Image (cartoon, rainbow, N blue to C red):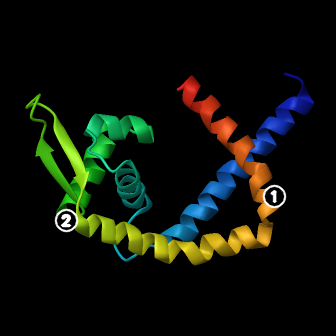
Amino acid sequence: MNESSNSLAVALFSEILTADQLVRNRLTRVLPKGMEISHFSVLNHLARANDERSPAQLAKSFHVTRGAMTNTLSKLEWAGYIHIRPDWDDARRKMIAISPAGRRARDAAIDAMSPMINELVAELGDDKVRAALPILRELRIKLEADD
């Protein structure tokens, strides 16, 4: 890799990391009290999947350790946002489902985030966002494949 390519790569990842940090800060401020981004992410995943997942499946989906996922799931269970039950086929495993309260919390989070996200997209313009999505998606897919 030549110096120009190296500078380009560093600039790309610097922008992604900085944007990630800024978005996380903004989201944290608008999420309902007590909800963390990781909580919303798991609730959103479960709501969209509309099916149960094991803690191992969730950890793999979010590219985190099982311990980190267990911590998040414990907090969500304590809040009443998920149901954890034994796997009927393998008693050593557990299965996770979103509860009605979890769906309401996820919906409230989306309602709270939507104005901020919509404002950012409006400021950038639909065309720029549409143009950026395939590149970001390809980058994500490449990073997942290398994981």
Residue 23 as seen in the image, left or right of residue 4 = left
Residue at left 40%, top 70%? 107
Residue at left 55%, top 31%? 144
Number of on-image labels: 2
Picture disc at residue 110 = none
**Residue 39 visible:** yes
Q: From the image, which quarter does the N terminus lie in?
A: top right
Q: CA distance from mark 2 to mark 1?
A: 39 Å
Please state which of residues 32 and 85 is positioned toward the viewer in this rendering: 85
Q: Is 65 located above or below residue 110 in the figure?
A: above
**Position of residue 131 measured from the top left corner of the image (x, y, whole percent):** 80, 50
Q: Is 19 located above or below residue 30 in the figure?
A: above
Task: Look at label 2 and name its amino acid.
Answer: Gly
Query: Of callouts 2 and 1, which one flags the residue occurring earlier in the amino acid sequence?
Result: 2
Instruction: Kindly check if marks 2 and 1 are in contact, taking CB atoms under 8 A apart as contact.
Output: no
Would you name the residue on which mark 1 appears?
128
**Position of residue 143 measured from the top left corner of the image (x, y, whole percent):** 60, 31
Q: Residue 126 appears in which quarter of the rendering? A: bottom right
**Position of residue 138 measured from the top left corner of the image (x, y, whole percent):** 68, 36
Residue 108 as seen in the image, left or right of residue 132 = left
Would you name the residue on which mark 2 appears?
80
Residue at left 68%, top 75%? 119
Disc 2 crowd rating (10 Å Cα; few below 14, some 14-19, many 20+) is: some
Q: Nearer the viewer, mark 2 or mark 1?
A: 1
Q: Residue 128 appears in which quarter of the rendering? A: bottom right
Q: Is 106 located above or below residue 47 in the figure?
A: below
